[in-house]
């Protein structure tokens, strides 16, 4: 078996998708004054920061941004192999979420379990008035009743396919590709 990879979004397409999502957020929320973007570590945090930059260019004022580590909230907790302790990456939400509109941001939406864990993590910090979800790619196959409010690209996939997101901040390139096995 051989692995085949096909590019779905190149650098320009990623930039256009994030610009569109930024405009949609502003429109849906009638401005961003009561909103906080919370990126799900790691790539979701990078995307949240980029959206915040776009919104500041459009609106002329900054939007609050934070990031959340959902490691301890996962129902399929990943452990380090040596001591069985979970690997933590840190949560940083420097603004109160109480009575604010929190927009969770992630790279790929698949089963919905990561988003559920992120909602639990946010609720432990405070009670927002509303939680919305923005994703760069929605690939389907939900196991929980979670639906994104903002989508960069819908990509119907089989469970055997893998969506790979690369971002300059962590991977030195902006690209979304799909990988699958060929015989």
Image (spheres, rainbow, N blue to C red):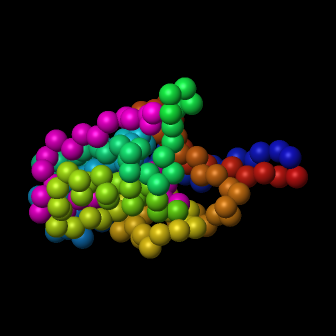
Q: Residue at x 31, y 57 (%)?
A: 120
Q: In this image, 160 relative to 81: left or right? A: right
| Image-quadrant location for residue 34 | bottom left
Residue 21 against residue 41 in the figure, above or below: below
Q: Which residue is nearer to you in this view: 119 or 21?
A: 119
Residue 23 visible within the image: no
Q: Is residue 71 magenta?
A: no
Q: Which residue is nearer to you in this view: 106 or 174?
A: 106
Q: Residue at x 44, y 73 (%)?
A: 145
Residue 110 rendering spot, x and y as whole percentages? 53, 60
Question: Which stretch appears magenta?
Answer: 85-110
Q: Is residue 90 magenta?
A: yes
Residue 180 rendering spot, x and y as whole percentages? 73, 52
Residue 57 rendering spot, x and y as whole percentages? 21, 48
User: Of helix, strand and loop, which mostly describes the magenta segment?
Assistant: loop
Q: Residue at x 16, y 41 (%)?
A: 94
| Image-quadrant location for residue 93 | top left
The single residue placed furthest to the bottom in the displayed view is: 145
Q: Residue at x 48, y 46 (%)?
A: 77
The single residue placed furthest to the front in the displayed view is: 83
Q: Which residue is nearer to you in this view: 162 or 89?
A: 89
């Amino acid at each position: 078996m051989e692995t085949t990879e096909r590019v779905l979004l190149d650098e320009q397409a990623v930039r256009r998708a994030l610009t569109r999502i930024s405009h949609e957020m502003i429109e849906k929320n009638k401005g961003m004054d009561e909103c906080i973007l919370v990126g799900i570590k790691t790539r979701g945090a990078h995307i949240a920061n980029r959206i915040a930059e776009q919104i500041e260019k459009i609106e002329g004022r900054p939007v609050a941004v934070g990031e959340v580590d959902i490691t301890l909230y996962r129902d399929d907790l990943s452990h380090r192999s040596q001591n069985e302790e979970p690997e933590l990456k840190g949560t940083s939400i420097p603004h109160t979420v109480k009575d604010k509109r929190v927009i969770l941001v992630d790279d790929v939406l698949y089963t919905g379990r990561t988003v559920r864990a992120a909602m639990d993590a946010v609720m432990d910090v405070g009670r927002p008035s509303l939680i919305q979800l923005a994703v760069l790619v929605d690939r389907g196959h939900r196991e929980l009743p979670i639906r994104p409010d903002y989508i960069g690209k819908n990509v119907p996939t089989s469970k055997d396919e893998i969506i790979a997101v690369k971002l300059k901040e962590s991977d030195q390139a902006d690209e979304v590709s799909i990988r699958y096995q060929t015989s």
